Image (cartoon, rainbow, N blue to C red):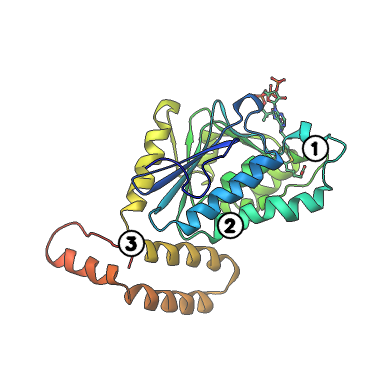
Amino acid sequence: MTGDRANPTYTTLRYEVADAIATTTLDRPDALNALTIPMKTELLAAFGAVARDRVVRAVVLTGAGRAFCAGQDLKERLEPDAPPLAVELRERYNPIITAMRRLDQPIVGAINGVAAGAGASLAFACDIRVAADGASFVLAFGRIGLVPDSGATWFLPRLVGPAKAAELALLGDSLSAADAERFGLVARVVPAETLAETAREVAARLAGLAPLALAQTKRALQRTWSVDLEAALDDEAYRQGVAGATADHAEGLRAFLEKRPPRFSGE
Ligand code: T3D
């Protein structure tokens, strides 16, 4: 099915649900999908729609046109009634990043072009990133006298290591898709013309897995960044207990013994 059942009236993004995959496309291509207040509001609403929709088992986040997202719309920022930066971050950007990380469903970032500023942060907050060969990442904040935000200072050292993160954050140089793959920032780089299909294939594979186990895996991978080994072991044991009690685990075992693909119900 197509369209957000809760909110069919998005104006700055497209939201389509088909085959258990919610595809969210940032859709202001003339401004390289720069983030305005309406777009941030709609993006948060879209992730809220995903969170409420048990039909959706995976998300694809991408951009329309030649860019993924150029970060904050700098023309809007120059408007006289623009909110103070810290307020805008606390009230709009941070809730989006938190919503992405709290979502049970995994998010596949299909990075179709440049991801700059908070646009790069959005890409970092995805669970798996696949990039078009012409895509790039730019921590553009310093170029306009700002500090990396929307999670950039948290995600980047964890994704590429502290040395490369410092270079990217402080100098603001553009990182090509090929280098992003080399540094482990993206899982895969593909020709631009096959990006949508590749992202959809990855999302379809995720959508075919057991959703409760995936949600626990997503949480465990996140938690491991802030705890020691013993706490991680304990956390795994707890989550395995949760996953092991699901009907999907029983189905997985049955399917293995019966030599057939499992049919996970999400129970
Ligand atoms: O509320 C807050 O402000 C706090 C939150 C801050 C978070 C942030 O994201 S701060 C960082 C904001 N983003 C940037 O500084 C990036 C600005 N853009 C660029 O540096 C470059 O456009 C790119 C490296 C992304 C791409 O360069 P290029 O040469 O491929 O494209 P271009 O020619 O610069 O841009 C094409 C059009 O998009 C152009 O419009 P025009 O002249 O054709 O009418 C340009 O103005 C527009 N555009 C690009 N980025 C933005 C934008 N318009 C508004 N805001 C943008 N961020």
Residue shown at the point (45%, 54%) measured from the top left:
106
Tell me the kind of residue under disc 2: Ala
- Say the numbered circle drawn on residue 77: 1
**Mark 1 or mark 3, which is nearer the start of the sequence?**
1
Could you tell whether 14 is left or right of 214 in the image?
right
Q: Residue furthest right?
A: 80
- Mark 3 and mark 1: Cα distance apart in space: 42 Å
Residue topped by disc 3: 210
16 displayed left or right of 77: left
Tell me the element at label 2: helix
Drawn side of residue 53 relative to residue 134, left or right: left
For mark 2, what is the residue? 99
Label 1 CB-ligand 1 distance < 8 A: yes
Residue 162: give x, y in percent of width and height: 65, 53
| Residue lying at 42% horizontally and 74% vertically, measured from the top left | 239
**Disc 3 on helix, strand or loop?**
loop
Task: Determine the secondary structure under disc 1.
Answer: helix
**Farthest left residue?**
258
